[in-house]
Image (cartoon, helix red, strand yellow):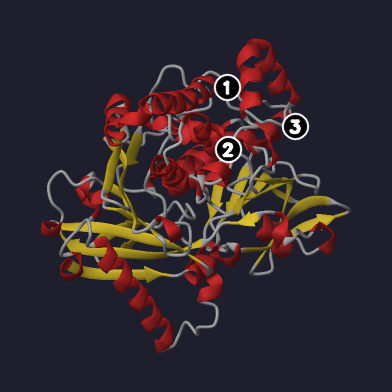
C-alpha cells in the first residue's frame, strides 16, 4: 500500500494532537485528519462579532514551571520540547464556589489561604480537612516524581519501578482508593462532604465516592503547585500551538477532512477512508474519537462493537456564549464560578451552573468595554432529539432554558440579563454535530468501585489501532487527555524503535 504517513490521527482533539506532535518530533511521520476547519475539538475557540469564545474548557492545569514535574506540568514541558512558546496568565483562584445555605468559597492558588477559608466555615473539622488534603498532596508528590509514559510499555514500567520503587508501590495502592471514601475516613460533617462532592463534580461530573483518589490528587492538589494558567488568546491557543509543532517538524494537518471509517483487514488497521471516498494508509492509526464512535461507527465490523452500557456515559452540555457590557462585572470578580442552588439535584441535568469570564484575565478576547461570559449546564441529547433544529420550537426551547440559566446566574452577577449584547446557544445536538461525539457526551466514566487502571489504555483489540483522548486513561479534562496523548506516543514510538526522550 502507498502509505500517506507512518501514523494517521483521526481528529485534532488535544490527545491526538499531542501524540502527533511528539511522534513527528521524534521523526515518525504523522498525518492528522480533522472534520472542522479549526483544531482542538472541545478545547477550541470560535469567533463571533469581535468576540473569541472558548468552545469548552477554560480551567487549565499543566502550565506550571516546577523543577520537579514528573507526570505534571505537561503543557509546559511539551511545548518546551517542541520549541513553541504559549504565553499564559496566572489565575489566583481555580473556582469560586457558590453553594446552598450561603456557603461561598474561592479555591485559592495559595493552599494556606484555601485551607484557612475552608476551616473557618468548618472549624470543628480542621484536623480532618488537613488530613484529607494532605492525602491529595501525597498523590501529587508521587506523580510529580514519576516520569510520564505508557502503562502498557514494559520497558517504561520497569524503569520507573527500578528508579522509584517505594513511590511506585505507594501509587499502585492508591489507585484502589476513591476520593470520597478517603474523605470519609477523616470527615463527618455532611455539608463539608457535599463540598468535596462538588470539588469532584466540577471537573469529573461524578461525586467524590465515584472519583479515583489519583485523579483528585492531580486536579485538586496541582492547583496549589503548578496552578491554573490561562493561555493568551483563549483555549484555542493550545491546539494551534500543537499544530505549529507538528508542521514545524514536517507533519501535516488536513482540515475539513472527515474520516468516515477505519480500514481494517484481518484484525489489523491499515488506514482510513474520508467522506470524499479517498483512502489513506499508514502503519498505525490513532483514534481521538470516543470509544463508542470508534468501534460502533468508524469500525464497521460488528465483532468489535462496544456495548453502550460497558461504561457510564457522561452527560453532554447546554452552553451559553455571551458578549456583555463590561460594566456589569464588578472589580475583584473571579474568572471561574460554580453555582449550586440545592444539593438534591446538583448532579442532575441543569442542576449545577458552570460560569467563566475569561476576559477578566485576557481582555483581548472581546471588543473594548466588553466581556465574555461562558455559562453551561449538563444536558442529555435525548432531551433535544425530538426537535427539528430548523424550526421555531427548537429555538424557543433553547431561549427558554437560556433565560432560566441567566436568571439563576444573576445571583452572583446582578443585571446580567440587561447587559447581553451577543448570545450564542449550543445544545447536546450541537456537540454531537460539530465534534462527532456519541450523543454529544463528555465521554465514558468509570463505574463506582472500578479501579482507575480499568480505564482503557492506548492499545485496542485491533492491531495497529490505538486510542487517545477521554475514552482512555486517565479520563476527562484537558490535562488528562494530554497525558493520554503522551502515553500513546510513548508506546507507538517504542514499537517503531524510536523511543521518546523523557520530557524535561
Residue corresponding to mark 1: 147
The residue nearer to you, when weighing 68 against 203, is: 203
Tell which tag, 2 or 3, sits nearer the viewer.
2
Along the horizontal axis of the image, is 453 left or right of 334?
right
| Residue neighbourhood size for the residue with mark 2, other residues' Cα within 10 Å, grouped as few (<14), some (14–19), many (≥20) | many
Along the horizontal axis of the image, is 208 left or right of 415?
right
Tell which tag, 1 or 2, sits nearer the viewer.
2
Whole-percent x, y for residue 493 in the image: 68, 32
Whole-percent x, y for residue 351 in the image: 41, 61
Q: Residue at x 75, y 60 (%)?
A: 307
Residue 64 in view in this figure: yes
SS at circle 2: loop
Q: CA distance from mark 3 to mark 1?
A: 19 Å
Question: Is label 1 in contact with label 2 (beta carbons under 8 Å)?
Answer: no
Mark number, residue 294: none
Q: Residue at x 58, y 62 (%)?
A: 437
Along the horizontal axis of the image, is 272 left or right of 215?
right
Question: Is label 2 in contact with label 3 (beta carbons under 8 Å)?
Answer: no
SS at circle 3: helix
Rendered image quadrant of residue 452: top right
Q: CA distance from mark 1 to mark 2?
A: 20 Å
Tell which tag, 3 or 1, sits nearer the viewer.
1
Mark count: 3
Mark number, residue 495: 3
Mark number, residue 212: 2
Q: CA distance from mark 2 to mark 3?
A: 30 Å
Whole-percent x, y for residue 234 in the image: 33, 48
SS at circle 1: loop
Residue 504 in view in this figure: no
Amino acid at each position: 500500500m502507498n502509505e500517506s504517513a507512518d501514523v494517521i490521527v483521526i481528529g485534532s482533539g488535544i490527545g491526538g494532537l499531542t501524540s502527533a506532535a511528539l511522534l513527528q518530533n521524534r521523526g515518525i511521520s504523522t498525518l492528522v485528519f480533522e472534520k472542522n476547519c479549526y483544531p482542538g475539538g472541545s478545547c477550541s475557540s470560535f469567533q463571533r462579532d469581535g468576540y473569541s469564545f472558548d468552545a469548552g474548557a477554560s480551567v487549565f492545569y499543566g502550565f506550571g514551571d516546577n523543577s520537579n514535574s514528573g507526570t505534571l506540568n505537561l503543557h509546559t514541558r511539551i511545548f518546551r520540547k517542541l520549541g513553541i512558546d504559549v504565553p499564559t496568565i496566572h489565575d489566583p483562584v481555580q473556582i469560586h464556589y457558590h453553594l446552598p445555605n450561603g456557603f461561598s468559597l474561592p479555591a485559592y492558588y495559595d493552599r494556606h489561604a484555601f485551607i484557612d477559608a475552608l476551616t473557618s466555615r468548618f472549624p470543628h473539622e480542621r484536623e480532618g480537612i488537613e488530613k484529607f488534603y494532605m492525602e491529595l498532596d501525597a498523590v501529587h508528590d508521587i506523580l510529580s516524581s514519576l516520569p510520564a509514559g505508557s502503562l502498557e510499555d514494559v520497558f517504561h514500567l520497569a524503569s520507573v519501578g527500578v528508579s522509584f520503587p517505594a513511590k511506585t508501590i505507594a501509587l499502585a495502592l492508591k489507585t484502589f482508593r476513591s476520593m470520597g471514601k478517603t474523605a470519609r475516613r477523616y470527615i463527618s460533617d455532611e455539608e463539608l462532604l457535599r463540598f468535596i462532592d462538588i470539588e469532584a463534580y466540577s471537573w469529573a461530573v461524578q461525586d467524590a465516592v465515584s472519583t479515583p483518589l489519583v485523579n483528585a490528587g492531580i486536579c485538586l492538589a496541582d492547583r496549589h503547585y503548578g496552578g491554573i494558567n490561562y493561555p493568551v488568546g483563549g483555549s484555542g491557543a493550545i491546539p494551534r500551538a500543537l499544530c505549529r509543532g507538528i508542521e514545524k517538524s514536517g507533519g501535516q494537518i488536513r482540515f475539513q477532512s472527515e474520516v468516515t471509517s477505519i480500514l481494517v483487514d484481518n484484525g489489523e488497521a491499515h488506514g482510513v477512508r474520508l467522506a470524499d471516498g479517498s483512502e489513506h494508509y499508514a502503519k498505525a492509526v490513532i483514534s481521538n474519537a470516543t470509544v463508542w464512535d470508534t468501534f460502533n461507527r468508524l469500525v464497521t465490523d460488528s465483532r468489535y462493537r462496544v456495548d453502550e452500557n460497558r461504561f457510564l456515559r457522561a452527560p453532554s452540555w447546554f452552553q451559553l456564549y455571551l458578549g456583555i457590557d463590561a460594566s456589569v462585572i464588578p472589580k475583584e470578580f473571579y474568572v471561574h464560578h460554580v453555582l449550586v442552588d440545592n444539593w438534591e439535584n446538583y448532579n442532575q441535568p441543569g442542576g449545577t451552573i458552570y460560569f467563566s469570564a475569561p476576559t477578566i484575565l485576557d481582555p483581548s478576547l472581546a471588543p473594548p468595554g466588553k466581556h465574555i461570559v461562558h455559562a453551561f449546564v449538563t444536558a442529555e441529547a435525548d432531551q433535544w432529539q425530538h426537535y427539528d433544529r430548523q424550526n421555531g420550537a427548537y429555538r424557543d426551547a433553547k431561549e427558554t432554558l437560556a433565560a432560566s440559566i441567566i436568571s439563576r446566574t444573576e445571583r452572583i452577577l446582578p443585571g446580567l440579563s440587561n447587559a447581553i449584547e451577543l448570545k450564542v446557544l449550543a445544545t447536546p445536538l450541537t456537540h454531537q454535530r460539530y465534534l462527532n461525539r456519541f450523543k454529544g457526551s463528555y465521554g465514558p466514566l468509570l463505574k463506582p468501585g472500578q479501579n482507575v487502571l480499568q480505564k482503557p489504555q492506548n492499545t485496542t483489540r485491533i492491531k495497529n489501532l490505538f486510542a487517545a483522548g477521554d475514552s482512555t486513561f486517565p479520563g476527562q479534562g484537558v490535562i488528562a487527555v494530554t497525558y493520554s496523548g503522551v502515553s500513546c506516543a510513548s508506546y507507538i514510538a517504542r514499537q517503531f524503535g524510536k523511543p521518546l526522550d523523557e520530557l524535561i
